[in-house]
Image: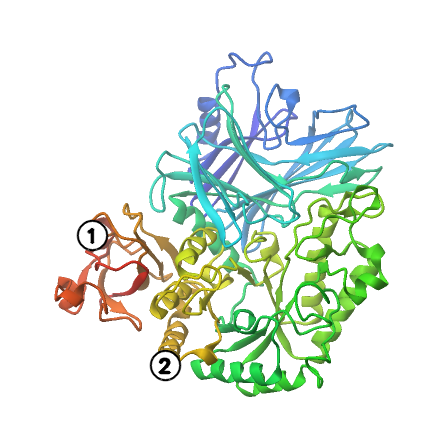
Amino acid sequence: MSSLHHLRAGGVSLVLAVTGDRLPTVVHWGADLGATTDELHALALGVAPQPFGYPVDGPMPVSVLPEASTGWPGVRGVAGHRAGAAPSTRFVVTDVARAERPAPWSAALTLDATDTDAGLDLRLEIEQARTGLLRLRATLTSRTDGVYDLVGVLPALPVPDRARELLDFTGHQLRERSPQRQPFTHGTHERNGHRGRPGFDSGFLLCAGEPGFGARAGEVWAVHPGWSGNQRMLAERSYHGVSLLGAGELLEPGEVRLGPGERYTSPWTYATYGVGLDDASARVHDWLRSRPEHPRRPRPVVVNTWEAVTFDHSLARLTALADAAAEVGAERFVLDDGWFGARRDDTAGLGDWVVSREVYPDGLQPLVDHVRGLGMDVGLWVEPEMVNPDSDLARAHPEWILTAPGGRRAAPGRHQQVLDLSAPGAYAHVLGQLDALLDEHPIAYLKWDHNREVGEAGLPPSGRGAVHVQTRAVLRLMDELRSRHPGLEIETCASGGGRVDLGILQHTDRVWASDSTDAHERLGIQRWTSLLVPYELLGAHVSAPVAPTSDRALPLDFRCAVALFGHFGIEWDVTEADPAERRRLAEWVAFYKERRGLLHSGRVVHADVPDPAYDLHGVVAPGHDEALYGWVCTASSEVWPPPPVRLPGLDPRRRYRVTLDGPVRDLEGIAARWGAGLPWVEAGGAELPGRLLGEVGLAMPVLFADRALLLRVTAAR
């Protein structure tokens, strides 16, 4: 007889069966069943497969930590050995406890189990947020003499057979989170990353869904490793009728070796379900927003100095930039790389977190005072995990640098080596320097960069894998600084978008999605990053007229309209803008301030527009009384004019008025140039029920490539 455990919240059910003393199996993960206990037992019986064709006699239960001891021939949930022995597990459940949890959580199931032959104790935790989001993790404790070499822990959840298509992501610097789709066929689709961070080509979110699933249609199930180091993700389909999605930490050989009484706790594996990607994404966004530590105050307009001045720092130039930033309405001024040590270019000084007296003879305080006198707060760029060999720190403490096997120095990357923050001395040194800096100056914000992949670098002197302990040390360092300096915000940056995950978002307040500030490229980067990251945590900046990362010239209105759907900022030397450009930029800044309450609280939605030249995305207020959509063109369309496009997310029972919004209202340079206005725009707007806007849609204006318009939707009174 099985005991059934039903976690149910936010429109999602997870039904687990604990049969005898075996680890739990999943009866159902998906839409809320709303069923009674008797009905669930009947369901468990009704969906139990015929035990036919298995490699073992009888049933072959596949748990959330799949085990070879049940006959499962696929990837194992717990992999390891004791000097080559005990390569598989046979956990016996000793206790199951359910607890209701305070917000933002709903309920949690905790299972304790033991494997006497492998000498391991297991605690398995499964939690459900009130939004329906799930997360799982496992803690292993070695209970016998000797060493247990842990190879990996990979929680996994089954998906139904109708999930026949996979979506995950790849990319490179300046083009992070590029989607890729493929059939979910028999075998294993595995994404491993050995970069010491998720990387530009991270799988990010591994989705399985009904063929053709999109933003608004098709059931979809997805998993994500909430871990900022090496990651592992897989989708596995077996001829036994089992399809799994798994995600977790990727361990290097010998990286975790458990002695008697020592334990390892896996990172959280997150899992979300929805009808369409928007629905699955909303469960993540709503959970993030419900956390007590989620940013609550309006997200300030940021001006970052990097693309304006790079390493060419001078007080006169920076104060002029701050004056121009304040003129257009900026609220935060972030001083990027080049303010410290011997950092006149990227070859020296990294690791010496003291203000350069060569560049700032009177220290940072004159600049800080000037910026704050203009009504802006101050941010600062740091890269605490790295060091230039040409630095005072590296010369004084070469033993604090991670090494390759045999003690040799790892191959350089970006003229950098990795600082071993797991070493107590190195950790204390970096903490002390940053703490002193934050004590001396009213710094509100750290842009925390990570420009070098760890690669082969390991713990000295052996070169043993360092990513696990390094990642935990980095997160601990962030937490310690935030604890000592309440209100401090941290942005996670890694050469752009190389470290974006739900793990680091528990320690930071913003992600830098990409070093690409080209709005044409940013449109896709921000769209897919927002699968997990709501707009208020997603840095999006207006670049110079010619984007320095692509040499592409783009109109100001387009650059602003793309940056609007994020945490708005400016990455441009505004002192070089002419008066008309400054006035227009100030209009966009003011518009962002008017709409950021909606942008940073509403449901993020996307239309499934068949034409790849066009995109419609937006935000719908929690009460469905207003919405803001961006209608964007990036290429010449095969269809001219475009057919009606559905406006997603509105209440079908309410009536809405649709008008153009924002600084671009008059279709400048578009079809109206030829005297052919769009009828509903010419009429001053359209008023229709949400049902018709969502099911039929509205005709959209013809746009030239790299142009955008905004639509305001308000509930009729």
Above-or-below relation of 250 to 434: above
Q: Which residue is mark 2?
A: 583
Which comes sooner in the sequence, label 2 or label 1? 2
Q: Amino acid at mark 1?
A: Pro
| 191 horizontally vs 520: left or right | right
Q: Amino acid at mark 2?
A: Arg
Q: Position of residue 495 (x, y in %)?
A: 58, 57
Q: Position of residue 185 (x, y in %)?
A: 46, 26
Residue found 39% across the figure and 66% down from its top? 559
Q: Nearer the viewer, residue 282 or 393?
A: 393
Q: Position of residue 324 (x, y in %)?
A: 48, 82
Q: Position of residue 209 (x, y in %)?
A: 41, 36
Q: Any mark on residue 644, and which?
A: 1
Mark 1 secondary-structure assignment = loop
Mark pair 2, 1: CA separation: 34 Å
Mark 2 secondary-structure assignment = helix
Looking at the rendering, in which quadrant would you find the N terminus? top right
Q: How many marks?
A: 2
Viewer-side label of 2, 1: 2
Q: Nearer the viewer, residue 342 or 77?
A: 342
Looking at the rendering, in which quadrant would you find the C terminus? bottom left
Q: Nearer the viewer, residue 622 or 661?
A: 661
Q: Any mark on residue 197, and which?
A: none
Residue found 42% across the figure and 65% down from its top? 563
| Residue 337, quarter of the rendered image | bottom right
Above-or-below relation of 549 to 299: above
